[in-house]
Image (tube, rainbow, N blue to C red):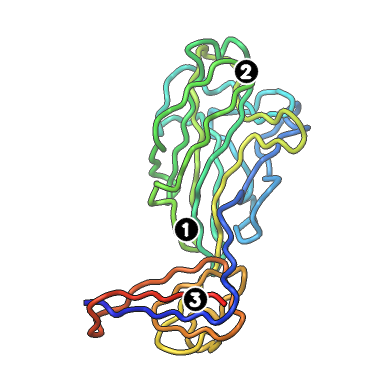
Amino acid sequence: MKKGILLFIHAFGMTYLGLGQIAAWDFTGVGSTSLPTYAATTFNSNLVSTSGANNITRGATAAWSTANNSFRTTGFKNEGISTSNTDYFQITLTAATGYILSLSTIDARFAGTASFCISPGVSSQFAYSLDGSTFTLIGSSQATIGTPATMTQIDLTGVTSLQNVAAGITITLRYYASGQTTTGGWGFYSASAGTNGLAIGGDVYNTSTFTGTGNWNLAGNWSNGIPTSSINAIIDGVATIDIAAQTRDLTINTCPNQGFNNQYREISHY
């Protein structure tokens, strides 16, 4: 048997914010001179960005090759995709202390030499790691023909390992490609200012959990202070709300057996 959770709201409703873009690289104006790394042009303030953590970098055999508005290499060749390959581009994402990180999407735009991407095209695939050494390919490779090209958005919400990642754990993403020649150039590309060659969607959020029984506005009932519009709230008890409460997202959990046969949720908006 499960204890019911009775959540009475005698105030305005909660504020909910969905997933959005947390990191992106606009390559406009770069690439014609040596570009070993490049800092993100969009980076969530609750991600670690020190010591180059917001840079896109290169594997040992993915050296820079010249191309306007691009992050390109001639190292991808036509050897197929494997996590053992050293021709890749890499980014890292780490939630700052007190925050949790979830990834939702990857969007990418490419350009390269015409011979490299003739039919049957260039195969592209991302991989992830939580320890920086063991990588897992995400889904199946995608083939694109011609240049420039846009990858179909990758949905990461079903990749359990990339959801609710605690602060201090670094998510490493690598991009692999294989085309139709051994020397053709290929990489991320921005067609114009404001167009990202690579963009990561997700959520970086703080959470506070309500336990016990009492009023929403009692700080002692919360693990990380009374929620605001930028903090997610988790209800793990019986909370009474008779104030103008707000939260980023609201999760209502059940509690251990307390003699109730059913689960109850009562939410009223006034």
Dot placed on the residue nearer the N-terminal end, 3 or 2: 2
Above or below, 252 relative to 164: below
Kind of residue indicated by mark 2: Thr
Q: CA distance from mark 1 to mark 3?
A: 39 Å
Proximity of marks 3 and 2: CB atoms separated by less than 8 Å: no
Residue 14: x percent and y percent? 57, 70
Q: CA distance from mark 3 to mark 2?
A: 54 Å
Residue 20: x percent and y percent? 59, 51
Provide the secondary structure element on which disc 2 rests.
Answer: loop
* Residue drawn at the location 50% of the way across and 42% of the way down: 173
Asked where in the image residue 56 lies, by quadrant, the reply is: top right
Question: Which residue bears the numbered disc 3?
Answer: 268
Residue 52: x percent and y percent? 64, 50
* Residue drawn at the location 53% of the way across and 28% of the way down: 61
- The answer to whether 57 appears left or right of 234 in the picture is right
Of all residues, the one furthest to the front in this rendering is: 270
Question: Which residue bears the numbered disc 1?
Answer: 169
Asked where in the image residue 165 lies, by quadrant, the reply is: bottom left
Question: Which residue bears the numbered disc 2?
Answer: 147
Instruction: Report crowding for label 3: few under 14, some 14 to 19, many 20 or more residues within 10 A (C-alpha).
Output: few
Above or below, 119 relative to 97: above
Q: CA distance from mark 1 to mark 2?
A: 36 Å
